[in-house]
Amino acid sequence: MRKVLTGIRRAILWDYPRATWQYDVMVGVILAFLFLTPRAWFRDQPRLPGASRIAILQAGHGTTVYWIEADLLAGIPEARQLEKANELVRASGERQSVTRLEPALDSESEIKGYIAFTRP
């Protein structure tokens, strides 16, 4: 029993020197875990293009506020930006409609992103 407890303690503390069979088994177990664990266990799903650059800033009272990266709306005429922002929010899996879009400016008046206000 003492030998088993010593083996468990050494495995937890990674006490085996390199190039031993115990070390190789530990590395093999870690690699098997990395490559054989289903993606769904960690809720790691592929994202739609552009969805990773849209973030929820705040939600409450039926409205949600999103941050949209500036390059997602770059080159789009101002009259069509609200429509494009609506498409981006819906493509990220939300069922909200963008009602207002405000540019976020830095100290030199350059657009760093957009704040989109939505309603269900």
Image: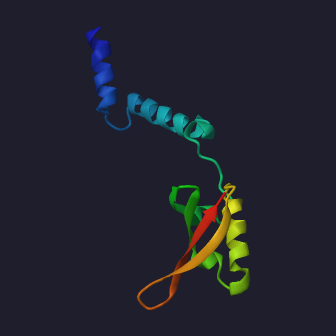
Q: Nearer the viewer, residue 109 or 17?
A: 109
Q: Quadrant of the C terminus?
A: bottom right
Which picture quadrant has residue 103?
bottom right
In the rendered view, does 89 fall on the left or right side of 61?
right
Q: Residue at x 59, y 68 (%)?
A: 117
Label count reads: 0
Which picture quadrant has residue 116?
bottom right
Residue 55 pos. (x, y %):
54, 62
Q: Is residue 92 above or below residue 23?
A: below
Q: Quadrant of the N terminus?
A: top left
Q: Residue at x 70, y 68 (%)?
A: 86
Residue 23 pos. (x, y %):
39, 33
Outermost bottom residue: 108
Q: Is residue 21 above or below residue 77?
A: above
Residue 48 pos. (x, y %):
68, 59
Q: Nearer the viewer, residue 116 or 28?
A: 116
In the rendered view, does 22 fall on the left or right side of 58?
left
Q: Is residue 19 above or below residue 78?
A: above
